[in-house]
Image (spheres, coloured by chain):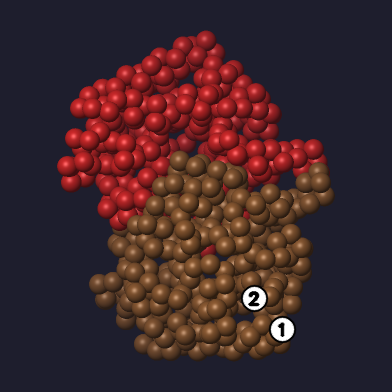
Chain colours: A red, B brown
Amino acid sequence: MNSRQIFEQIRQKQSFLCIGLDSDINKIPQHLLNHKNSLFEFNRQIIDAAAKYCVSCKPNIAFYEACGEDGLRQLAMTVEYLKINYPEIFLIADAKRGDTGNTSQMYARAFFETMPFDALTLSPYMGEDTAKPFFSFADKWIVLLALTSNESAKDFQLIKTENGRMIYEEVIERSKNWGNADNTMYVVGATKAEMLASVRKIIPQHFLLIPGVGAQGGSLADVAEYGMNDICGLLVNSSRAIIFAGNDKNFATAAAAAAKALQREMAKLLAEKRII
Amino acid sequence: MNSRQIFEQIRQKQSFLCIGLDSDINKIPQHLLNHKNSLFEFNRQIIDAAAKYCVSCKPNIAFYEACGEDGLRQLAMTVEYLKINYPEIFLIADAKRGDTGNTSQMYARAFFETMPFDALTLSPYMGEDTAKPFFSFADKWIVLLALTSNESAKDFQLIKTENGRMIYEEVIERSKNWGNADNTMYVVGATKAEMLASVRKIIPQHFLLIPGVGAQGGSLADVAEYGMNDICGLLVNSSRAIIFAGNDKNFATAAAAAAKALQREMAKLLAEKRII
């Protein structure tokens, strides 16, 4: 999928929502625990109910790894289910990997071949070596961490360099030409929406993956104000607020309602900005 | 295991060697490929032959993830085999994770509970949130990336901040009190041995995990010169130079010989510095 194709989905669904499948085995509804594939079953029901409101899904790999090989098996089932039934949905592995070229090659194989994800989140700390091996896979993407939405993001990302830039700006500036706007996205947290304006000065065309709307306090209107470009250029992620909206037999309906509420707000913003 | 116990192993084995189990399915000897558990069998034979020369083993998780759930199963077998047969060996998961507190909690469960690793490598980019959840596990360690040994380490780690420090120094300075010298190590590449002196000024007591000796050009003597403290304070990793020393039926003997050669050199350095 390239950026135009992602935009086409955004237009069709009038949504730039990414649903984060942070499927915590300790938080899914009780009645699913007797199921042989409880994590997959949880995901499947949510996907079937909410797919029409989102253009992207982002399983958080930690929640599957915590369940050992059985968790990984159910992650693979989830990815396969999505690819077969909802091939239009852009699939991001939220794994925050980041290693030397030799090792990145292995991660590329794990996330682009063994499992057919479209994109993988990466930490930039080890530099360009980290990213390079992924670019040899056609139509696959990396999503580089720039400015994250957690509290301690400030510990290093907001350090000022001798050039007067902040580290997250330096990361974007130095990495923007490793790949291009059709294989590289950036994570920019919604909790600092005004910083999106500075990000857009450096990379007007790239897609941004935005966490932190809702639970972590970011505003969707601010994100659209400072971050939207002419092909939308945004995927806004919501995880817990959607997948744990309900906690009984009707959890999937509750999740769909939460996703729909965000989609409605997004449709309004896309119309206001005259993008759809 | 605490730092004194690691030092006790270093004294007993006269070695501060960590063997990196970067067990690439495309590089292991041909005759093992018919084996049901070829990655595990490769690891087991190397461990049995070389365990007496090392104090630590470090599976690189990417190489197992690249083989899907079957790879993860064999990783778990390897870790269990090591824990049962060589409980004195300090087991590091080289996974370079790094995420928010909520997600780190899941990784802690995956690597400290589901699999009984002693330590996990972490990227510092997202700040203190990344590390905190791991400290509630007694006798477990995080190994924070500071200065890595790959070529593009310079892209961000050597950026100068407005304080005149480099980012890798800033990472060590700001994180050194998140935990303590009994639950936190740092990755400092051997390819820049003189920088070890600046690292030792900030953290005289912490253990350092040193990649990049051998294949990547670092010198063991330089590492000892600039990095050793009174409890040695070093784990020097070698991966490919040991595990792929041979490529036929005698691969384990070849690996043991390569490990022994490094151990001999380490014994000499430990004696010269009057540490053993």
**Residue A49 occupies quadrant:** top left
Mark 1 — residue? B273
Give me the residue at 47% from left, 36% from top: A2
Given residues A89 and B231, the one toward you in this image is B231
Q: Determine the secondary structure under disc 1.
A: loop
- Label 1: chain? B
Visible in this render: residue B164? yes
Q: Amino acid at mark 2?
A: Cys
Give me the residue at 53% from left, 73% from top: B5
Q: For this view, does A166 lie left or right of residue A78? A: right
Given residues A36 and B251, the one toward you in this image is A36
Up-down relation of residue A47 to residue B127 (above or below): above
Residue B51, x across and y down, in percent: 45, 82
Visible in this render: residue A141? no
- Label 2: chain? B
Mark 2 — residue? B232
Residue A258, x across and y down, in percent: 36, 21
Give me the residue at 57% from left, 76% from top: B7
Q: Amino acid at mark 1?
A: Lys
Q: For this view, does B73 lie left or right of residue B130? A: left
